[in-house]
Image (cartoon, rainbow, N blue to C red):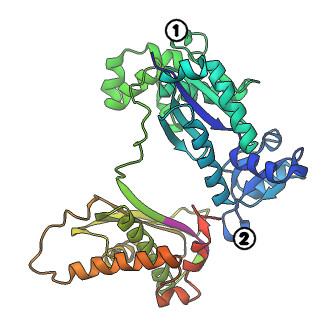
């Protein structure tokens, strides 16, 4: 039987900021983007802030109404990434099977580590202590015989356990997991929870008791997965290659103000295509399907679109992608101001598997030009080479260069 841990960092961003500013130890603290640039959303709230009812994902102004003495700290994404890597290095001292699930959650398979580091609970305590000594961030650890049990152990029990550690055993599901509401189960969102409740299924235990065929007839393979999860079954291994072979490359941004005219929207659309193509070349892939997503500026009346088009052949050349993205935008844009824009590239293939063409004789030069530009940017910075349009008021290239994941480094 395998032993899998899910190691989760408590209020990761907020904990790092409290370690950075010890005088804020006993203050309700949140990490939030800049409300002046429409990114005023709570990214992380410390336990004291959560006691006031503040939740991750809500808008900053709503959080400030709940807690008048709230301390707001801007995110420093590069620091969070660096500390996440440090935690990965700690976990790799216990096993070579470490699989990042998110920036603050990692699966590890310690099945073969018992003789070196002791039984699971003892090993979990050692990991917890080592992470605290190194980063001053508290780790919660869920233990199970597979990934789904470890995840639910952490989410529903470790986080509420004083020790921060819980072992969810399959033979004890009837008294631990099954009494929980069905929406608490990993993989069940709000919409699916509604469907299950309409079927009279209120708890995870009731879902586990539903005949498999009934769930398969209704949802196919997804119904099978629901049944397996409810019964604590999961055959997916902890692997270091879980993020290999990506299926899409995309980039989007919430604009600093409402963009009204086509001229300024084209500037950002071209910058996004530049970013997507640079990331594609870095992964040595090309794409054939271009998708453009737009959100309107009005919060009261939802507007926008999500549309795609397929090229004749795959490419990672900026202007090829931009021409298609622009056509999509012009076809579906209603002419109203927009607040968010995104471009993605799918139907990926390796860039050394290009079909020969008798007609596009300049294709190799275009491809080589992209890689040469990438080399210059990698050496001298992403703004070492930019298009003239990015120097206009609409351009966001310089601002984006200061950020990671949409937040300042």
Question: Whole-percent x and y of residue 13?
Answer: 70, 50
Which quadrant of the view contains residue 373? bottom left
Question: Whole-percent x and y of residue 148?
Answer: 49, 27
Q: In the figure, 6 relative to 35: above or below?
A: above
Q: In the figure, 113 relative to 209: above or below?
A: below
| Other residues around mark 2 within 10 Å, as few (<14) / some (14–19) / many (≥20) | few
On screen, residue 20 versus residue 351, left or right, reads right
On screen, residue 183 versus residue 73, left or right, reads left
On screen, residue 366 versus residue 226, left or right, reads left
Write the residue at 39% across / 30% down: 236
Q: How many marks?
A: 2
Q: Tell which of 19 and 212 is nearer to you.
A: 19
Write the residue at 62% across / 72% down: 402
Q: Residues in magenta?
A: 252-256
Please say if the residues under marks 2 and 1 sit with CB atoms less than 8 Å apart.
no
Q: In the figure, 278 relative to 389: above or below?
A: above
The quadrant in which the N terminus is found is top left
The residue indicated by pointer 1 is 171
* Residue 202 visible, this orientation: no
């Amino acid at each position: 039987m395998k032993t899998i841990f899910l190691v989760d960092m408590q209020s990761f961003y907020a904990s790092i900021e409290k370690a950075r500013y010890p005088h804020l130890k006993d203050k309700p603290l949140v990490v939030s983007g800049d409300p002046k640039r429409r990114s005023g959303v709570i990214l992380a709230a410390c336990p004291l802030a959560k006691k006031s009812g503040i939740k991750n994902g809500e808008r900053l102004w709503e959080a400030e109404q709940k807690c008048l003495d709230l301390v707001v700290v801007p995110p420093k994404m590069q620091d969070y990434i660096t500390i996440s890597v440090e935690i990965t290095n700690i976990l790799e001292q216990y096993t070579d099977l470490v699989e990042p699930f998110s920036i603050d959650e990692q699966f590890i398979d310690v099945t073969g580590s018992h003789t070196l580091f002791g039984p699971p609970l003892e090993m979990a305590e050692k990991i917890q202590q080592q992470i605290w000594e190194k980063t001053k961030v508290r780790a919660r650890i869920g233990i199970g015989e597979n990934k789904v049990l470890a995840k639910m152990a952490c989410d529903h029990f470790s986080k509420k356990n004083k020790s921060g550690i819980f072992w969810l055993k399959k033979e004890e599901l009837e008294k631990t997991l099954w009494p929980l509401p069905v929406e608490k189960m990993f993989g069940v969102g709000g919409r699916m929870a509604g469907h299950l409740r309409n079927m009279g299924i209120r708890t995870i235990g009731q879902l586990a008791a539903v005949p498999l065929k009934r769930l398969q007839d209704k949802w196919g393979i997804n119904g099978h997965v629901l049944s397996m999860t409810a019964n604590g079954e999961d055959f997916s291994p902890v692997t270091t290659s879980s993020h290999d072979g990506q299926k899409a490359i995309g980039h989007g941004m919430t604009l600093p103000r409402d963009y009204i005219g086509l001229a300024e929207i084209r500037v950002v659309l071209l910058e996004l295509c530049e970013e997507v193509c640079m990331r594609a070349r870095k992964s040595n892939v090309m794409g054939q399907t271009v998708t453009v997503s737009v959100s309107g500026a009005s919060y009261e009346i939802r507007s926008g679109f999500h549309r795609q088009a397929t090229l004749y052949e795959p490419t990672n050349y900026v202007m090829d992608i931009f021409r298609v993205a622009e056509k999509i935008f012009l076809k579906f844009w209603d002419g109203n101001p927009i607040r968010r824009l995104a471009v993605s590239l799918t139907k990926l293939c390796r860039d050394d598997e290009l079909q020969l063409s008798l007609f596009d004789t300049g294709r190799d030069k275009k491809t080589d030009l992209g890689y040469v530009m990438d080399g210059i940017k990698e050496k001298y910075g992403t703004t070492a080479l930019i298009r003239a349009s990015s120097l206009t008021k609409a351009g966001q290239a310089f601002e984006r260069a200061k950020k990671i994941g949409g937040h300042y480094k």
